[in-house]
Image: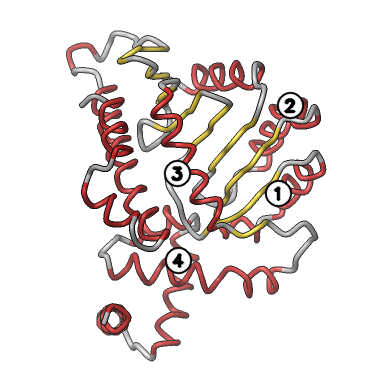
Amino acid sequence: MDVVKYVKTAQSGAPAELCTAAAGEPQAFLRELATHLGLLAQEAAQQAARPAAAAAVEAPAEEVVGPGVRYLHGLGSISTAINEALGAVRRDILTAQPDGARPSAVLKDALESVRRQISAGIAMRTLYQHTTRFDEATKEYVRAVTEYGAQVRTLEEFFDRLIIVDDVAFISANEDRTTAISITEPTIVRFLRDTFDKAWDRAKPFPFVPLHAAKAADEVVPAIRESISRLLVEGYSDKAIARRIGISERSLQAHIAAIKQELGAHNRLQLGYLLGRNEATYVV
């Protein structure tokens, strides 16, 4: 599959499902977009895979596969490419970080990697998932970057990890994110910027003052549970739902128990029926 051609096609109006969603609600559009970005990542992972006969041969750190598109193999290669882009940034930095809270050490490294740029006036916008509002390390990081002028918002769920530095974009190419794609092809970068901007417009500002967990829950839990309900109806596994929402499977079970209690369901089978009936009512 030609990665450049795929995204150019998506931007120009195909596939049809993306066009239909774009004409309706923004949330429906972003769900379709997330699906197609997922397909893109799957195709990239398949292209990056090596035949079993060549397994013993070390893969190159970088691999150009088309105009403005190259694979980065290994975390070291990915970090080097991102740091090079950050070192040359002139306008802005956009980051989308799914999967919920991140380790404190990772956040400290992230702050150090952009501190000089944002303190010098480079604009930075970051998207997290709602669940990060309960994490102390993330709240400390947000307080630090916003003091330098960065903006941070949260959503219940969105597309996979995305970093855009001026005119270069980075997306994951496999599930464990040990391979990435660096993109400088202008059409694809514009497409990914538009994707980010649509998600940004829907997102809610991360609180600039410390919030107790109860207050954070009041603001974001309804949206989180709405997403969980929709994903259950769509047939996603608990593991997949937890990953998309950015929570542990144990936390997911607590949310599902609360949804069951709210709807008066006695088991998961009845819950599925009630959720499906409610969704059908909304459509009608």
Give x and y (percent) for residue 221: 55, 71
Secondary structure of residue under mark 4: helix
Is label 1 or label 3 in front?
3
Q: Which residue has dot 2 on it?
A: 117
Indicate the amino acid at tag 4.
Answer: Leu
Report, in whole angstroms, how far the alpha carbon at label 1 lies from the one at label 2.
22 Å
First reached walking from the N terminus: tag 1 or tag 3:
1
Numbered badge on residue 252: 4
Left or right: where 103 falls relative to 199: right
Q: Are marks 3 and 4 in contact (CB under 8 Å)?
A: no
Left or right: where 222 falls relative to 210: left
Indicate the amino acid at tag 1.
Answer: Ala
Give x and y (percent) for residue 268: 30, 78
Is label 2 or label 3 in front?
3
Report, in whole angstroms, how far the alpha carbon at label 1 lies from the one at label 3.
27 Å
Is label 3 or label 4 in front?
3
